[in-house]
Image (tube, rainbow, N blue to C red):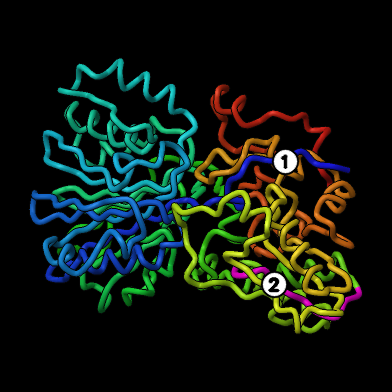
Amino acid sequence: MKVAPLTVRPDRMEEACGVFAVLAPGEQVASLCYFGLYALQHRGQESAGIAVFDGDKVRLHKNMGLVSQVFDQNVLELMPGDRAVGHTRYSTTGSSKVCNAQPLVFMTRLGPFALAHNGNLVNTAELRKQLLVDKLNINGLDINSSGDSELIAFALQQAVNSGMAWDEAIKAAAAQCKGAFSLAISTPEALYALRDGHGLRPLVFGHLGESGSAAWVVSSETCGLDIVGAHFDDDVAPGELVRFKAGEDHPFRSRWCEETPKLCVFELIYFARPDSRFFGESLYSYRRRIGQRLAQESPVEADLVIGVPDSGIPAAIGFSQSSGIPFGDGLIKNRYVGRTFIQPTQAMREAGIRVKLNPLRDVIEGQRIVVVDDSIVRGTTSRKLVQAFREAGAKEVHMRISSPPVTHPCFYGIDTDSQDQLIAARFNLEQIIEHLGVDSLAYLSKEGMLQCAQEQASNFCTACFDGNYPIPVEVELREHKLMLEPSGLAQS
């Protein structure tokens, strides 16, 4: 069968954002925040920013680009203070412009605040309308950016200006929001961390130095704590607000809502760094385990197991361990390729330019290979990889995917294509095999994926695999991305 050409865009489940914050009197908090964002760079490579509080004064620096491009030593030295909030962004709502970069800094009757947001709201139209209706409560309401994070900041600004204290206002603003939001907020008085009721996006906190030193760090992942030498204390629980104050040896923790936890399962499979810890273990261990389960569910006779760098490698190692098929490096990744504004021409693409991955002919030639990857989204990258393996002399190419078929778009902070661009939503398994040009293809079952997490299956959001969205989505958003009938979806 022939498949209609798809629009050119990254063939991945694009990253969420990363938030990092630190409260450490007497320390170089801007530099600590820089390194924290550096560890979270995988969560967003579009823009980066840091806001530092020195008393009731705020210094903000943000721009488009990677963390190392936006900041240097001279910039960081001009940002003294005792509290910092940082953000690294991949846009899911709002265009790629510096006005949408974070953190956001707003002024209120109680002084300024800085806010960094990871996630995506699903009631932006409703919230925007409500904010405009209530705009007489503040002076100069002007919603400039197209991002939903600004709406959260405006809701908090209005709540404070209506007479509420910071704790009360943050909870009131969060109550107006529906969707995924993990927040780090600094005020002149304290540092705050908050997660939405379902806890769709991760957020953790820990302490610097000895316990009781009243120096605190908040991060999207534990790898952000590790890089600055902070000790992990706990996750910010779904529906929890945590307040950190200078001089207090313990944070104040309170629940602002109660919902069923629904952590995005793709955080475990792909998004978060393999050295980050979820549920008491590194994600490397989980990803190796799903590879082992995949080998048990979908065995194949082959000579070599190859992982697609980087996220497919732990699962490939697990597949090798369980199947007894040797693991080998069959793909070399260019470690210096990140996001770039310089794209290959169409002629270069047609010639098969290999910017990121290149197969090793002397490893692959004459071999029956099993290629393990974390997911297939549109299928364009997988198809090119299979073609490259064939050209390198592979005798057989079998593909194994360490997640179920992606059949539905995400509305909670991950940038995915509309449903009609997802290959597993358009075609059945046999058609996908033909399109990719593989000898066989198998996906991990949803049951296997969840059982390997060793947590309650009901505590994860699996909407991208089954369409069971835990939070209702506005009709306009659904109509924009959900375009196919369930009967057209591929089966694993």
State how far apart marks 2 and 1 are (Cα): 27 Å
Residue drawn where x is 71% and y is 67% of the image: 290
Query: Looking at the picture, does residue 414 appear above or below residue 80?
Result: above
Ranked by sequence position, the earlier of labels 2 and 1 is: 1
Q: Nearer the viewer, residue 83 or 455?
A: 83
Q: Is residue 168 magenta?
A: no
Q: Nearer the viewer, residue 423 or 253?
A: 423
Q: Nearer the viewer, residue 357 or 487?
A: 357
| Element carrying mark 2 | strand
Residue drawn where x is 37% and y is 55% of the image: 88
Amino acid type of the residue that numbered disc 1 sits on in the rendered structure: Pro
**How far from the left and from the top, in percent, is residue 198?**
51, 44
Query: Looking at the picture, does residue 441 appear above or below residue 357?
Result: above
Disc assigned to residue 307: 2
Residue drawn where x is 82% and y is 74% of the image: 393
Q: Is residue 309 magenta?
A: yes
Disc assigned to residue 5: 1
**How far from the left and from the top, in percent, is residue 14?**
54, 51
Amino acid type of the residue that numbered disc 2 sits on in the rendered structure: Gly
Left or right, 130 with respect to 136, comes to right
Region in magenta: 301-310
Q: Quadrant of residue 399?
A: bottom right
Left or right, 358 with respect to 251, comes to right
Residue drawn where x is 88% and y is 76% of the image: 302
**How far from the left and from the top, in percent, is residue 473?**
56, 29
